[in-house]
Each structure stands twice: as C-alpha cells, then as structure tokens.
Image: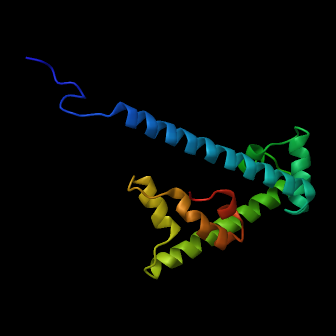
C-alpha cells in the first residue's frame, strides 16, 4: 500500500507555476521600487520644507544621525518637532478612522471593511483603500502606491 503524497492525484503544470511565481516576483519588485521612489520623494519634500518646518528640522536631524523615524513615532525623540509631528499624525489617524466609521454607520463600504476582508484573506487588495486614505488625508498616496 503506497502512502499518498501531497501531489497524489493532482495534476500540476510546473511551467505554469514557475511563470506565476516569476510574475509575482516582478510585481513585488515593481511595488518595492515604487515604495522606494515614494520614500525618496517624501524625504526630498521634507528636506525642502514642503512638509512644514517641523519635518524640515526632523529631516536634518535624521540625516545627521541624531534621530530616526522610529524614535520620532515611538516617542523616544522628545523634541518639540517630533512631538508636534506625532500629535498631527494622531489627529489625522483619528479623523480618518472617524470618517471611515461614519461610512460604515451609513451602510457604505469603507476602507475598514476592505482591510478586514484583506486581513481575513477574502481576496481584497489592501491597496484598494489608498484612494480613500488619500482623499481623507489630502495626501497623494494613490500616486505613490497605485493599485495595479
């Protein structure tokens, strides 16, 4: 009596599987490159002062090794600029969540629903929430992270 293997009775086209993996790898590389480009743009905007005086000062401190994004957002960096950026981020996140909750309360699909479906593996694309996030925050995430 032979022991069934995970491939028993299954028909696999390995060439197709390799092709799919290659496609996924190319997509991941493209997304990684897009994220790096978006990060580079944000850094340049911070350095130029386009994101505000606080970010300009913080970027100078990051560049000189005096602080990091992790230290800023963890609260370890207690500078006035870091505290202000954290307060603004908290306010924006709270406002965004409130707006999404209002959408849900009105019976509309919200990014919270989309994220829940993605978390539960229901095939939702987490990038689908980016246009709504951008509209809510006034940002340009949709341009930086397109839902291909």
Residue at (89, 42) in percent of width and height? 63
Residue at (44, 60) in percent of width and height? 116
Q: Residue furthest top?
A: 1
Q: Quadrant of the N terminus?
A: top left
x, y (%) of residue 146? 62, 59
Residue at (82, 54) in percent of width and height? 82
x, y (%) of residue 21? 46, 37
Q: Is residue 94 left or right of residue 75?
A: left
- 63, 34: nearer the viewer: 34
138 w.r.t. 23: above or below: below
Q: Is residue 146 left or right of residue 49?
A: left
135 w.r.t. 130: above or below: below
Q: Is residue 80 visible?
A: no
Task: Count numbered badges in the picture.
Answer: 0
Q: Quadrant of the C terminus?
A: bottom right
Q: Is residue 41 visible?
A: yes
Residue at (32, 34) in percent of width and height? 13
- 63, 74: nearer the viewer: 63
Name the image quarter holding residue 48: bottom right
Name the image quarter holding residue 3: top left
Query: What scheme was used to colour the molecule?
Result: rainbow
x, y (%) of residue 34? 68, 49
61 w.r.t. 96: above or below: above
x, y (%) of residue 33? 68, 44
């Amino acid at each position: 009596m032979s022991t069934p293997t995970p491939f028993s009775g299954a028909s696999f086209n390995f060439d197709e599987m390799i092709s799919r993996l290659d496609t996924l790898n190319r997509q991941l590389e493209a997304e990684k490159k897009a994220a790096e480009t978006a990060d580079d743009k944000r850094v340049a905007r911070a350095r130029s002062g386009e994101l505000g005086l606080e970010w300009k000062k913080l970027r100078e401190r990051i560049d000189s090794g005096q602080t990091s994004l992790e230290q800023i957002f963890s609260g370890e960096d207690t500078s006035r600029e870091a505290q202000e950026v954290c307060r603004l981020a908290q306010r924006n996140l709270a406002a965004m969540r409130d707006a999404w909750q209002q959408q849900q309360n009105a019976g509309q699909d919200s990014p919270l629903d989309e994220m829940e479906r993605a978390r539960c593996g229901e095939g939702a694309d987490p990038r689908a929430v980016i246009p709504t996030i951008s509209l809510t925050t006034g940002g340009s995430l949709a341009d930086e992270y397109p839902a291909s």
